[in-house]
Amino acid sequence: MSISINRRQFSLLALSGLAAPALVKSRAFAAETITVLNWQGYGTDEAWALKAFAEKTGITVKHEYFNAESEMITKVKTNPGAYDVVLINSARVRQLGADYLSPIDQAKIANDASIPPALRMHPNFVIDGKPYGNVWLWGMTGMAARAGKAKQGDSLSLLADPGFTNRLAMNDDPVVAIGIGALMSGQDMNAPKDLKLVGEKLKSLKKNIRLLWQSEDEWNKAFAADQFDLSVYWSGAAIRSRQNFKLPVDFIVAKEGAIAWVDTLTVPKSSTKQDAAYKFLDYMIDPDFYYEWATKVGAPASANPAAMAKLPDGDLNKITHKADYLATMQIMGPLSDDVRQSFVDLWEETKAFYAK
Amino acid sequence: MLLPTYGILAISVFLPLAVMAFFSILKRSPFDPGPLTFTIDNYLVFARRPYLIDVAWTSIQLGLWTTGACVAIGLPAALALAKATRGQSQKILFFLIILPFWSNGLVRIFSWTMVLRDGGVLDYAYHQLFPSAAPLGLLYSFPAIVIGLVHAYLPYMILTCYLSVSAIDDQFLEAARSLGARWPTLFLKIILPLAMPGIVAGSVLIFVPVIGSFMEPRILGGKTGVTMGTVIEDQFTQAFNWPLGSAMSFVMLGFILVLFGTFAGALKTRPVAAA
């Protein structure tokens, strides 16, 4: 028996031969693993979500965690190729910048389409016209009070009110502390012109301050033990304290505003799995993922209005995080090393004053 | 034969110190791109930031109080272990003393917040005795930091004192008693001088890490918990200023060396015969 093939059949065979490595590659892609660097328990490591993502894309997601933003920056700088997706507060994106991060091609992220361009291209993470982070979540740092002890629109001067003597918990973070002092003195929190005045405002809290907290867990335990009534606290954490731990806490947006912050997911320049990383970025900003995360676990506000719209009416997250805040509030912005050091120095000096 | 030992010592002790010493004379973080520039400005930290003198004094007070409390509790405990217990009960007591070493530091500190807080274990017991008294208010105070640190470091003092005290020959004590010495004389003239090597070793092992501690001050101290340890930690975690943090650590190290150098005479232990 003889087999004869014509030119067309030969071409098809040849093409299929050429396609074989691509098929192999595609199978290899199916078993691809990406590594995400994030805070522990901050959305990207939800087991149910990673299972759904793996089923959808065939991509497995591994995690590494950091406990401080400086640790994250050190890890990215010193471990090239180790991470494919990194969570970075937008104010810190420039610290890594084009030397360590890839510009994000937003056209490859379908869910980005419903995010307002002003947020998608926020100056915090746009360098030379290109975004180096994909905007993901936002939240606020403002006042949180035991139910009934303060109301929406109260002034930040409440923090120094004698009615809260020895009943105030302050966030032990220099950028937040200086930001609060700047808002109390009517200044730009990212570049306060009169740092002395900021220091005076912060020092006026001395009689009220009972503790300086650093973690949400520490805050919850102290609040549950009735150690304080008023605090500088994170909006998302306040919602979790109320929903998950049934603590009687109200998040208050003061009349002077609150410190808004925006978190981005970035792709390091050294990542060799950028396509898979983009798929993960798209999944993280997907309204379906956010709905599950926000309603079952508790999350900050999504940067995707479509995701926020999916939340039920009356949802505490939806009520707390009004979309127009992002347009009216000061957003935590990049700080140069010198400015950051001056903030740290002022906060250390203030803390030493509290301790005296 | 000693070469591997020296090698391990060099790698585990001197290499990290040498790296930190190198960082401390840099102008910017070693991970920043661009050429390295050097400065000694970081070592002028106490001149540039006078408030750090208060902070350093708080750290020293913390070291003195913690070491003092460890001596006050550790020496009698070591005496009891060495002279009043034998066999199985001694083993159990040793196990209980070493137990804090086996527990996670953070868990240990957070468990103290449960004990010290208003309405916590201590406060509850106090109000059972004095129902109308004001809350103890121990948590978020200087004594709370000392309590947390004493719990963490007491085993060092007990173990070093135990070694000294167990070496005291009972015949010394019997001879003193037969000559009419009472308990205070026995303690001051015989036990204390002979236990001094253990007390000194324990004090050095405790004082040095305590003045650089940051977890206990942060979690138990509230607004009083500002120490050199927390300031140095903030340089690494908040300011990302590794050079300044390293320089502060070396200034503290220098201070400790000067302190020990100054009191070296007093710290010298005397042989038994001299006692």
Image (cartoon, coloured by chain):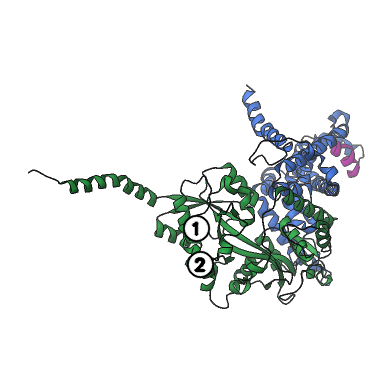
Which residue was labeled with disc 2? Answer: A114
The residue that disc 1 covers is A106
Which residues make up the magenta segment?
Answer: B181-194
- Please tell me the colour of chain B: blue
- The three-letter amino acid code for the residue at tag 2 is Ser
**Residue A247 drawn at (x, y percent):** 66, 71
Q: Is residue A299 visible?
A: no
Chain label for disc 1: A
Give amino acid for label 1.
Gln
Q: From this view, report whether residue A199 is shown above or below residue A97.
A: below
Which colour is chain A painted? Answer: green
Going 80% across and 56% down the picture, which residue do you hit?
Answer: A195
Which quadrant of the structure image shows residue B243?
top right
Residue A230 location, x and y as percent?
A: 74, 69
Could you tell me how far apart the alpha carbons at marks 2 and 1 are, in whole angstroms?
Answer: 11 Å
> Which of B7/A11 is in front?
A11
Circle 2 packing at 10 Å, graded few (<14), some (14-19), many (20+), is some
- Magenta segment, principal secondary structure? helix
Letter of the chain that mark 2 sits on in the rendering: A
Which badge, 2 or 1, comes first in the chain's sequence? 1
Tell me residue A280's x, y (percent). 47, 57
